[in-house]
Amino acid sequence: MVRTIYSFPEPRINNNFDDVYSPSEDSYLIIDYFRENIDENYFDGFELAKIRNILDMGTGTGIIAIFLQLIKTIVPKFSPQIYASDILENAIKCAISNENANNLEKKIEFIQSDLFKKFPSILKNSFNILIFNPPYLPSFKFKNEGWDKKNIDYCWNGGKEGFEVFLEFIRDVKPFVDQNQKFYIYYISSSTTNLKKLNDNLNIQGFKNTILKKKHVFFEEIILNRLEKRKD
């Protein structure tokens, strides 16, 4: 009999940096879904014992990585190494400070990197669960046309169509997922972008996309999705 987890830990999160994205509706959409779909044996249907490494890309304050690390303290079968990465030095500083505030000193492995550019080769073929709350708002102000992006822009500026950053992640992620078994990639998208075009790109890259949860916030609908390898 599977025991439902009725009380999940609440991460203590502070953010004293102007250029670091604070937890918002999209962050909690992810966390709430995990609360509903993690029990003592399974992570959203994925057997806990088979999960080796988890990556929180674009960690910001570290809230998702810390939430998952805290779950390890109450679910004995859940024992993966948690990694958290961000392009911004201040985000890594903020996340480490929050890790310490939650009494998890040096439990999470932090990597400052622009997507996977500075990831060590030892991490290839290793991640079973990947989470990315990417910048997803469209903007004409993107780096390939020579604009100077302020650090804060990394929090929201997804590129001209809103999903260029995420598609770059998708192109680079394949060597790092565990090819020996299934893997899940969780990500946030927005109704302000061309979702059909995004999904067509993901299909071309060999991924099956499943919409898990939606929430209407102001002018947009934010969407939690799960990618897995498409079975042809």
Image: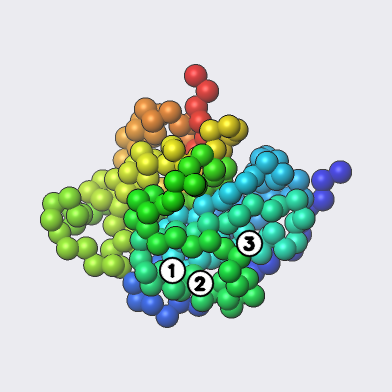
State how the image is colored: rainbow
Between the residue at mark 1 and the residue at mark 2, the CA separation in whole angstroms equals: 6 Å
Pick the residue in front: 122 or 13: 122
Q: Is residue 26 left or right of residue 149?
A: right
* Label disc, if present, on residue 96 of the rendered structure: 2
Q: Is residue 104 left or right of residue 39?
A: left
Give, as a three-letter code, the residue at label 3. Gln
Query: Hey, which quadrant is residue 5 in on the image?
Result: bottom right
Image coords of residue 80 (percent x, y): 64, 52
Between the residue at mark 3 and the residue at mark 1, the CA separation in whole angstroms equals: 16 Å
Query: Which residue is label 3 attached to?
Result: 69
Check the image and report above or below for 232 versus 97: above
Q: Is residue 34 left or right of residue 40?
A: left
Query: Which residue is label 1 attached to?
Result: 92
Between the residue at mark 2 and the residue at mark 3, the CA separation in whole angstroms equals: 13 Å
Query: Hey, which quadrant is residue 118 in on the image?
Result: bottom left
Q: Is residue 68 visible?
A: yes
Residue at image location 70% in from the left, 45% down from the top:
48
